[in-house]
Structures are given as structure tokens and as C-alpha cells.
């Protein structure tokens, strides 16, 4: 296995969407919608093409991380730009081999070099703490609904970069997926059985 990391290009788009679909299928719900999120992010103004990386084994795309612009809005309606990371996906047969870690470390290094101040995510704390993410409440940042929980995390890209920034976090609306839109998009991919039903959720 010889893993390399490079920027995604147009020729990768469908391969990345297929890989993302495989990575997230049945993980959080029946099927998944993360591949549609990836497809749509690239078309938004929030998309940051300089932070859209693929991990490759030779020529095969086995992982991807993508970033978009988001904002924190204070009680006084002051807006602060931050990064939203995700989805981060790795092909199931390549998971557990450190590829997600390579993508995260590389993209964080580039984000710092590009001058961004912070990254905010929803994810598994046991995984993301290793990169320096911590509960967003430590920086007085809440979700758009005014909530806070362990899976809602923030990472300062330089010391004190979130000083003076507090309020509610708003990701781009691209993450709001319409079920009908997803069903139409799914028809472009090979049929895949969902392993548990909506009734079990």
C-alpha cells in the first residue's frame, strides 16, 4: 500500500462520491446522504477547493476530506468566519490503516498555511481529540439550535484564534438534504440494500 494525498480534481468526482457512499452506508441511518453532500458542496460558494483532498493507493481513490466555509454569529449579530470539515470518508477496506489521520493532519496543516482560524465539526470525540479538537463549549460556541454536546467540537488553528469569538455555529445550507433529492441522486449509483429500516430508528 502506497498512499499519497493530493487535491481532488474533476476526474475524481464520481469516484469520490462512490467511495463516500461506501464509507457511510448504514453507518448513522439506513443508506446515507454524505455522498450527496459531497456532490453539492463543490457547487456552493462555501466550498474551499484548496482544502479538498483525496488519498490514493496508486491511482485508486480510497479517501477524501472536504471543507466549507461556515460562520459563528454572536448575540450582537457579529459574524465570524470559520471552517466546517466534512464529510471525511475512507473506503471500508482501507479503514483502520491511518488514512483518515493522514487526510486530517495534511488538511489542518494546509488550512493553517492558508490563514484560516478554526475548524468546527460534528464527529466522534474519541477520534477527533487526537487532532486537538475539543468541546466547542470551551470556546462559548453553541450549535445553531443553542445546544452543546461532546460530538460538537472546535479546533483553534493557532493559539487564541477563537478568543473573542462566541455565539451560534451555522454551517452552509448544503448539509440540509431533501429526501426526494437524495432518492433521485441515488438512482445514479448501483443498487445497494439498506441493512435496517426506518422503523428501527
Image: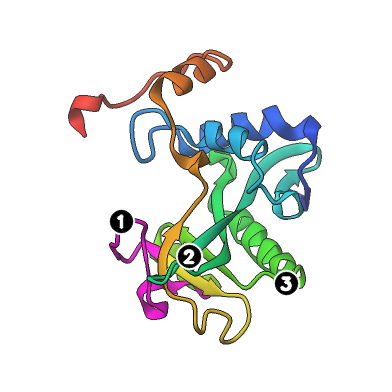
Q: CA distance from mark 2 to mark 1?
A: 12 Å
78 lies above or below 177: below
Where residue 85 sits, quadrant-wise, is bottom right
- Above or below, 127 relative to 172: below
Q: Are marks 1 and 3 in contact (CB under 8 Å)?
A: no
In reply to whether residue 139 is colored magenta, the answer given is yes
Quarter of the image containing the C terminus? top left
Residue 137 vertical position relative to residue 98 in the rendered view, above or below: below
Label 1 and label 3: CA atoms lie apart by: 28 Å
Q: Quadrant of residue 134?
A: bottom left
Q: Quick one: label 1, few (<14), some, or many (20+) residues within 10 Å? A: few
For disc 2, the marked residue is 72
Q: Which of the 4 image quadrants contains residue 151?
A: bottom left
Q: Residue furthest left?
A: 199
Q: Nearer the viewer, residue 52 or 27?
A: 52
The residue at the point 71 percent across, 70 percent down is 109
Q: Secondary structure at mark 2?
A: strand
Nearer the camera: disc 2 or disc 3? 2
Q: Nearer the viewer, residue 106 or 42?
A: 42
Determine which of the numbered discs, if any, sits on residue 115 in the image: 3
Residue 139 drawn at (x, y percent): 42, 78
Q: Nearer the viewer, residue 114 or 173?
A: 173
**Residue identifier under label 1:** 145
Q: Disc 2 vs disc 1: Cβ atoms closer than 8 Å?
A: no
Q: Secondary structure at mark 3?
A: loop
Mark before the other along the chain sequence, 2 or 1? 2
Amino acid at each position: 500500500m502506497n498512499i499519497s494525498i493530493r487535491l481532488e480534481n474533476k476526474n475524481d468526482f464520481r469516484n469520490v462520491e462512490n467511495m463516500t457512499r461506501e464509507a457511510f452506508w448504514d453507518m448513522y441511518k439506513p443508506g446515507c446522504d454524505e455522498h450527496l453532500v459531497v456532490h453539492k458542496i463543490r457547487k456552493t460558494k462555501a466550498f474551499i477547493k484548496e482544502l479538498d483532498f483525496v488519498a490514493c493507493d496508486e491511482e485508486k481513490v480510497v479517501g477524501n476530506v472536504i471543507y466549507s466555509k461556515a460562520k459563528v454569529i454572536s448575540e450582537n449579530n457579529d459574524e465570524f468566519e470559520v471552517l466546517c470539515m466534512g464529510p471525511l470518508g475512507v473506503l471500508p477496506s482501507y479503514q483502520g490503516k491511518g488514512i483518515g489521520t493522514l487526510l486530517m493532519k495534511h488538511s489542518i496543516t494546509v488550512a493553517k498555511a492558508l490563514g484560516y482560524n478554526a475548524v468546527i465539526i460534528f464527529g466522534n470525540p474519541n477520534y477527533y481529540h487526537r487532532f486537538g479538537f475539543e468541546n466547542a463549549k470551551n470556546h462559548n460556541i453553541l450549535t445553531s439550535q443553542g445546544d452543546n454536546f461532546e460530538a460538537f467540537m472546535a479546533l483553534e488553528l493557532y493559539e487564541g484564534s477563537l478568543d473573542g469569538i462566541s455565539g451560534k455555529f451555522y454551517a452552509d445550507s448544503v448539509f440540509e438534504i431533501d429526501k426526494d433529492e437524495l432518492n433521485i441522486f441515488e438512482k445514479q449509483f448501483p443498487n445497494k440494500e439498506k441493512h435496517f429500516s426506518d422503523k428501527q430508528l
